[in-house]
Amino acid sequence: MKSFEFFAAKDSSDAVTLLAQHAANAKVKIIAGGTDLLADLKFAAHGPDVVVDISHVDDLKNITLTEQGLNIGALVTHTQIMRSPLIRQFFPALVDAAHTIGAVQTRNLGTLGGNLVTAVPSMDSGPTLMALEAIVTIAGNGGRRQVPLNEFFVGPRKTILKPDELLAEIIIPKQNLGKPTHFLKFGLRKGQALALVNVAASFWVDWEKNVFLAPRIGLGAVAPKVIRAPQAEAYLEGRTISAEAMAEAGRVAVGDAKPISDFRASAEYRRHLVAVLTKRALESAWTLAQTRRLEGWNGQRNA
Amino acid sequence: MVNVTLRVNGETRSASVPPETTLLRLLRDQFNLTGSKLGCDVGDCGACTVIVDGQPVNSCLMLVGQVEGREVLTIEGLANADHLYPLQKLFEHFGSLQCGFCGPGVIMSAKALLDENPDPSTEEIRDALGGNLCRCTGYTKMIEAIKGASCILRGEEAPLVKSA
């Protein structure tokens, strides 16, 4: 690894100060879990001049319910997500997604924020958070700003973060708390595998009319960034819930995907996976919606 | 240079090393604890697995500056002069290793699992070893050894019959 200067931030405001001090005249990288960054830096021809360590920044490690919704600190690890009673209760899809990332060792170090900031299109945290219309808080020297996650990604390994900014928290808005959601990943192995395609499907149910309400579908590894599937969502909105509708939504979602062929899979195979995984994710979200209704969640929007 | 002080296998250790040094390099090159192996160096193989504050991690993916004040347990911290740790004893009994390069990492992953889950299912053991690659023996005999060790650590009699 190339040499660099190392600074450890004590809290998030200290981190922002360190970034402001160094980002103007040096190439700065933030290290959180380090599972992506160090793997990259060991092979990089030109490393950063300065590394700012935020792994001890405790104020970004909390999972809390607030007025805005469910706030997940950017430094929450994948293991913490899997074990959080709040997330297990409201969003088992996020638990499933976290469980498919890397292996135990990488899940213990790797953070939710890091997974988003690395911005690889196959990231396993992306589709579920996109389907749940997550918002991210970005901290910079001028204060904090919030943007929809949908606008956070620019392209492969590119986000809107400026060199002196850091991702502080991820918020699932209040109106989506407990929204029945399911995540599916297709990789070549269970552990240590990147997704060929990953999908999350989420919808509320109008139980009187038996129709889909606010259906949201997130797709990963089929475009330069994690995307929503607007055509499939429009197809489902207000439609009567049926197995045929879910299968058709899968076929429509293929039109929303723009996969490429690479050494992991062909574009054609990825399109096939989009149709199958979208259908199955919808079916499992429907099962979850019905189960929750039986358990006494009323399964309504703003419940 | 970064000055770092941490606890390794119960002892306080300090070093002054360049900031790009990983925890693995610190353990191997500064503290002469060469049980943790350098395999892929990018977090895929698990040969460098150690336990930091109770959690198994890839020591090749932590910088020294990140382990200040932490509690690190390596393979060297398990046995004493007279006795192997039960996991080590059972790996020996079942012939769970061949070349042995993955062994320290596998055993540290298994140790962390059993600390948290004293009676894991086969599925839970497989999940815990998902980040430890073994290319010679395979995993069947490791799983037998981990199940056996879990019995001993629970104070029960271990099934010592080998499958093949």
Image (tube, grey):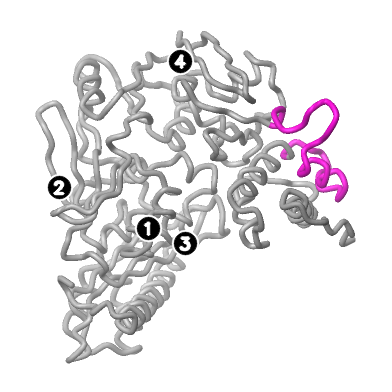
Expressed as whole percent of the image width and height from the top left, the position of residue A249 reads 29, 79
Question: Residue B79: within the magenta?
Answer: yes
Q: Nearer the viewer, residue A89 or A52?
A: A89
Q: Which secondary structure, mark 1?
A: helix
Q: Quick check: do tags 1 and 3 share a chain?
A: yes
Q: Which circle marks residue A147 in the picture?
A: 2
Disc nearer the start of the sequence (1/3): 1
Q: Quick check: do tags 2 and 3 share a chain?
A: yes
Q: Nearer the viewer, mark 2 or mark 3?
A: 2
Please name the residue that numbered disc 1 is placed on: A85
Expressed as whole percent of the image width and height from the top left, the position of residue A232 reads 25, 74
Q: Which secondary structure, mark 2?
A: strand
* Relative to B52, A19 lies left or right: left
Quadrant of residue B92 in the image? top right
Q: Which secondary structure, mark 3?
A: loop
Q: Chain of mark 3?
A: A
Q: Amino acid at mark 2?
A: Val
Q: Amino acid at mark 4?
A: Pro
User: Is residue A55 in sight in this rendering?
Assistant: yes
Q: Which circle marks residue A266 in the picture?
A: 3
- Residue at 62% x, 13% y is B30
Q: Which residues are magenta?
A: B75-102
User: Is residue A117 in sight in this rendering?
Assistant: no
* Relative to A168, B81 lies left or right: right
Please name the residue that numbered disc 4 is placed on: B19
